[in-house]
Amino acid sequence: MNRLFHFALSPFCRKVRLTLAEKRIEVELVEERYWEQNQELLRRNPAGKIPVLKMGDRMFSESQAICEYLDEVFPEPALIPRDALKRYEVRRLCSWFDDKFHREVTCNLLHERLMKKVTKQGYPDGKRIREGAAQIKYHLDYMAWLLEQRRWLAGDQMTLADFAAAAHLSCLDYASDVDWDRQPLVKDWYAKIKSRPSFRSLLADQIPGSPPPLHYADLDF
């Protein structure tokens, strides 16, 4: 049995979960309290990070590397184009969300509002929350600009870039931190992603003591 060591509100784990589900690869989800840095996690991944995917006797780490490996070994449906320029655009946008968006938005909003509570790291920092709330507007506007020119974020086909973006936004949506009315194009794009069978397990996630808003699992939000 394949196993994914993950945490429900990790966007990097969610990106891998979406990739696995889209390719219909069965996997057992094992919750990993990564902030505790226990020896088992360090044995699986010396970097002490999640996700970690166990397939056979191999351990795979780093979400982008995992997803690209899966796309090569299980090529249908393809999530990374074969054309070099299109592949570059997918990787550029994956980096945008996993680096810039994560640093400016996810860390400031999700970490302060929810993860500090879960990990018992103290009280939310209001300054960081305000900064994240301001920055997400810029990112939503940029996504809308992309979607004005394309059917999906990286082009006319759904790709790993869409999963990277949806992974971060779905975590923020769990905390009611996305103004979906700001950019209708982004809302319509997210509705398409959200309605896919591969998204179902994400919509069923529950963090004890911090339930999601009612619209979180609503496909007609």
Image (cartoon, rainbow, N blue to C red):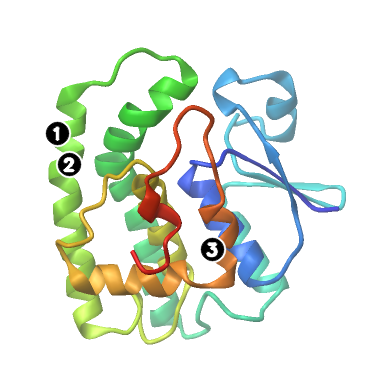
Residue 44, image quadrant:
top right
Q: Secondary structure at mark 2?
A: helix
Could you tell me residue 152's position as x and y percent?
35, 78
Q: Amino acid at mark 1?
A: Arg
Q: Residue furthest front?
A: 214
Write down the residue under mark 2: 133
- Checking the image for residue 114, the label placed there is none
Q: Amino acid at mark 3?
A: Phe
The residue sitting at 56% across, 51% down in the picture is 204
Write down the residue under mark 3: 199
Write down the residue under mark 1: 130
| Nearest to N terminus: mark 2 or mark 3 | 2
Q: Marks 2 and 3, how far apart in space?
A: 25 Å
Of marks 3 and 1, the one in the foreground: 3
Q: Is residue 127 left or right of residue 118?
A: left
Whether the residues at callouts 2 and 1 have beta carbons within 8 Å, the answer is yes
Whether residue 31 is situated above or below residue 188 in the rendered picture:
above
Q: Marks 2 and 1, how far apart in space?
A: 5 Å
Q: Secondary structure at mark 3?
A: helix
Whether residue 146 is situated above or below residue 150 in the rendered picture:
above
Q: Secondary structure at mark 1?
A: helix
Q: Residues within 10 Å of mark 3 (few under 14, many from 20)?
A: many
Could one spot residue 63 in this view of the protein?
yes
Whether the residues at callouts 2 and 3 have beta carbons within 8 Å, the answer is no
The residue sitting at 61% across, 43% down in the picture is 51
Could you tell me residue 147's position as x and y percent?
25, 77
